[in-house]
Amino acid sequence: MTDDGPDIPVGVRQRIFERFTRLAIAHPRGGPGEDTAMNSATDDVSQAIAAERQLMDPHIRASRNHAAQLLDPEFTEVGGSGRRWTYETMLAELPDHPGSSPDGPRYEPSEISGVLLAPGVVHLTFETTLGEHRTRHSSIWRKKDHTAGWRMYYHQATRVPPGTD
């Protein structure tokens, strides 16, 4: 693998993740009178979920170029440790974070849900496990234009102590 990840182009990987996510989510599709606004909101949430899943992929995490396409230039994060991250600090250190090695443990997401807050703004909540560690997450994704696609604008992670529901 090169610094840019596997030989599969990012656009193709994104479409694969989007199709996988669409299959995994129940879409409220109706008949001829279906609510197009609801479908648009569902599609936006599905696309944000697909992008979130991409950021959990060790190949994407290990590549500054690929991760940069998924993080908003104004990105900030408050990590489970309480540390504040910016776009630049995250891109610089993400390849060395847990879950970034194809041979190591991977983030396993569950209970992913989302809501369209406004046009081009989606809020996601979910849990992950990485080895023995469980974490709750909240992220805000925004889409400024169709060229850039969905990018993570804000992320908050909170560690869940063992034995906590």
Image (cartoon, rainbow, N blue to C red):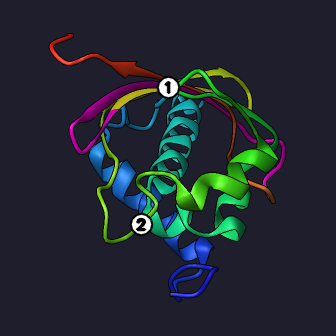
Is residue 37 at all visible to an observer of this figure?
A: yes
The residue shown at (83%, 48%) is 145
Residue 47: x and y, percent? 54, 47
Residue 147: x and y, percent? 81, 60
Tell me: 29 left or right of 15. Answer: left
Q: Name the residue under label 2.
A: 101
Question: Tag 2: residue type?
Answer: Ser
Start and end of the magenta stretch? 128-146
Sequence-wise, the earlier of marks 1 and 2 is: 1
Tell me the crowding category of disc 2: few under 14, some 14 to 19, or many 20 or more residues within 10 angstroms, Cα based. Answer: some
Q: Is the magenta stretch mostly helix, strand or loop?
A: strand
Q: 59 or 18: nearer the eye? A: 59
Quarter of the figure with residue 110: top left
The residue shown at (32%, 18%) is 160
Quarter of the figure with residue 12: bottom right
Is residue 72 at all visible to an observer of this figure?
A: no
The residue shown at (83%, 42%) is 144
Tell me: 109 left or right of 87. Answer: left
Q: Residue 80: which disc?
A: 1
